[in-house]
Image (cartoon, helix red, strand yellow):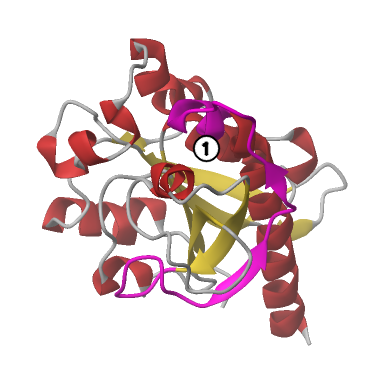
Amino acid sequence: MIRDSVKIENGDDKPKARIAVFGSFYRGFHVLSKLLEERLRHKIDVVGVATDDASQAFVSPGKRVWQYPHTQDEREMVQKLARSHGIDVYTGRVKTPEFYQRMDEVWKPDICIMATFGQKINATLFQKPRMGFLNLHPCIDDRWPSEFVGGNPFQALLDAGKTYTVVALHHVDDGFDTGELIAYSERIDMPPNAGVVDLHKLTSPYAAQLAVSEIEKIIDRSFSAQLS
């Protein structure tokens, strides 16, 4: 069942997919920015954004990108972009009755996309959206699941001496970066002497393009199936 529809310029009722973004830093910013493009407004509605509060221990800041030098603006870029578009923002724990209620009664997402987010998603959350709960994860394209799992894959790639990366889009499941693979981005060469923050900046546009392209396909297939 299609839960919501909106009027577009030609006056017809057209279904729109409700999307929630779980993201922070450059990857979250680029994914959200891409989803807000004018060309997608007839197809999707970003209904909520959950983003890291890097001052809180529950996002494991000492193990993830927040351990590296960064600015306050980089901490807040996702929530500022969301609020500038009137989107509901959440920065607390997601595995709580409060957030479950927000998902069920306010956001009601058809699909969720995670892009640099410091909390593990449990089954109560990843089983809710009817079109799936997806994640973006840097790795290399030799196998999936990747050996480069966890909250700081770029450092793992650098430690292993890799000279390129890809971004994998995959379904979220009970494991750490083990859900079914959907697609890889194109190959991205890693510049000599690049650090973790550099790689976040470099790869985020590729990740956003991959996510939005595949999300569009998922939405189109879902709506076509319901109309057939």
Q: Residue 177's quadrant in the figure?
A: bottom left
Q: Which residues are magenta?
A: 172-201
Quadrant occupied by the N terminus: bottom right
Neighbours of disc 1 within 10 Å: few (<14), some (14-19), many (20+): many
Residue 92 seen from this side: no
Residue positioned 41% across, 69% down in the render: 172
On the image, the x and y values in percent for residue 220 come to: 75, 68
193 or 152: which is nearer to us? Answer: 193
Confirm whether the magenta stretch covers residue 64.
no
Looking at the rendered structure, the kind of residue marked 1 is Arg
- Decide: is 217 above or below 67: below
- Decide: is 129 above or below 65: below
On the image, the x and y values in percent for residue 70 come to: 36, 16
Q: How many marks?
A: 1
Quadrant occupied by the C terminus: bottom right
Residue positioned 62% across, 71% down in the render: 182
Label 1 sits on residue: 27
